[in-house]
Amino acid sequence: RGGGRNDSGAGRDDGGLVVSAGSGNFRQPGRPRSDRIHEAILDATLELLRETGFSGLAIESVATRAGVGKATIYRRWTSKVPLVIEAMQRIPEIPTPDTGSIARDLTELLRSSIDVLRSTPLAHVLPSLVGERNRDPELSEALDGFVAERRRPLLRMLERAVERGELPAEADLELGVDLILGPFVVRLFFTAGPVEPDLVQPIVDAVIRGLGGLVEQKR
């Protein structure tokens, strides 16, 4: 009984940097073990979020999927909310272009958005989180921070358009971000409609018109 309790049981990694074996200690090649464990936990969290949603996500299930003990997770995250938010951060941010034209910026942004929705769990995971926020104040607050962080580059893109004179100074840019994201949100959360590239040009035109800018006329 002299040693500390192994929280994870045989065959599971306790998150230490150094492995003890035989005649001495040695380090595994490549990334530090703690980094690999951290990433495995976040990957497992995203996988299970997609499979079960936030309400069905259990720390024990994440631990099993990642091959660690529950205490290993609780040493890093105090509850499943910060764990989920950090796992969401692994989904790539949508690049915000700066082409010198708001129409081209929006076009590239929306095309990239469709690529992210198709290639990551975001379209499956985000509706689950939003659906639970009213029942979980901790999740609601954390999700507000996550969304605000993802909105900020879009707001800056619109601010550049104002600086170039493409949008009027009095334009409501927060509303502009809502107009950019709105069609995707409606399809993801309410209609389950496809998010297709043919949405891009109508959204670009609607955003620019809605903010009082001039839509480029197609030749």
Image (spheres, rainbow, N blue to C red):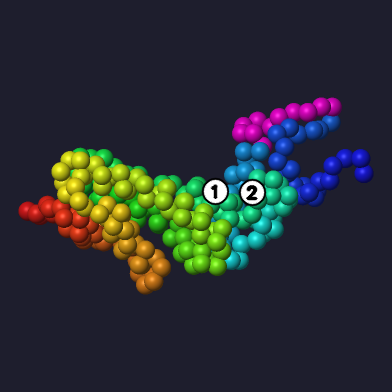
In the figure, is residue 200 to the left or right of 152? left
Spatial separation of the CA atoms under disc 2 and disc 1: 10 Å
Measured as percent of width and height from the top left, residue 61 is found at 67, 59
Badge 2 vs badge 1, beta-carbon distance below 8 Å: yes
Q: Residue at x 61, y 66 (%)?
A: 56
The residue pinned by badge 2 equals 77
> Is residue 26 part of the magenta span, yes or no?
yes
Q: Residue at x 37, y 50 (%)?
A: 151
In the figure, is residue 5 to the left or right of 109? right
Q: Nearer the viewer, residue 172 or 67?
A: 172
Look at the numbered disc 1 and give the secondary structure of its residue: helix
Measured as percent of width and height from the top left, residue 118 is found at 40, 57
Measured as percent of width and height from the top left, residue 139 is found at 54, 59
Please give the range of residues in magenta: 23-33
Q: Which mark is residue 115?
A: none
Q: Is residue 201 above or below residue 14?
A: below
Q: Residue at x 81, y 33 (%)?
A: 21
Q: Is residue 24 above or below residue 213?
A: above
- Three-letter residue code for mark 2: Trp
Q: Tally the numbered discs.
A: 2
- Crowding at label 1, few (<14), some or many (≥20) Cα neighbours within 10 Å? some
Provide the major secondary structure of the magenta segment. loop
Q: Residue at x 10, y 54 (%)?
A: 218
Residue at the limit of the structure toward the left, as seen here: 219
Who comes first in sequence, dot 2 or dot 1? 2
Measured as percent of width and height from the top left, residue 178 is found at 31, 58
Q: Which mark is residue 86?
A: 1
Residue at the limit of the structure toward the right, as seen here: 1
Q: Nearer the viewer, residue 47 or 142?
A: 142
